[in-house]
Image (cartoon, helix red, strand yellow):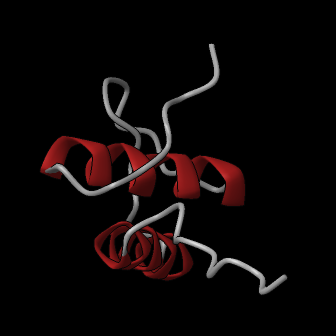
Amino acid sequence: MAKKAKKRKYSKGAAKKVERAMKKRNAGTLRSGRSGKKVKSRKQAIAIGLSEARKSGARVPKQKS
């Protein structure tokens, strides 16, 4: 049996948003939402990027609750 082609879980638009957030973090200009504190954590930068992607309508899997 032939293997099925695997579908992307995250769209290209979502990847671009995460990449943008990571670049801002590395430059030291990424800030968190309400408090406005500088983001130092890699995980938090990715979360911010995915959150922006969700808001813009990019295909991103649902958050685990």
Q: Is residue 29 left or right of residue 43?
A: left
Residue extending farthest to the bottom is 2
User: Residue visible at 29% across and 54% down?
Assistant: 53
Image location of residue 26, percent across then percent down:
55, 79
Q: Residue at x 40, y 60 (%)?
A: 30
Which residue is most to the front?
A: 1
User: Where on the picture, by quarter, is residue 19?
Assistant: bottom left
Q: What is the x, y in percent for residue 12?
A: 36, 79
Residue drawn 34% across the image and 69% down it: 17
Q: As drawn, which residue projects farthest toward the right?
A: 1
Of 64 and 9, nearer the camera is 9
The image position of residue 31, as x and y in percent, is: 38, 50
Q: Residue furthest left?
A: 56
Image quadrant containing the C terminus: top right
Where 20 falls versus 63 (above or below)? below
User: In which quadrant is the N terminus drawn?
Assistant: bottom right
- Residue 47, above or below 62: below
Q: Nearer the viewer, residue 54 or 41?
A: 54
Residue 64 figure quarter: top right
Residue nearest the viewer, comparing 1 with 44:
1
The relative height of residue 25 versus residue 58 in the rendered view (above or below) is below
Where is residue 3 shown, x and y percent of the image?
77, 82
- Report whether 30 appears left or right of 38: left
In the shown orientation, is residue 62 left or right of residue 6? left
In the rendered picture of this protein, how many numbered marks are placed on residues? 0
Front one among 16 and 8: 8
Instruction: Give the residue displayed 38% in from the left and 69% down from the top.
Output: 11
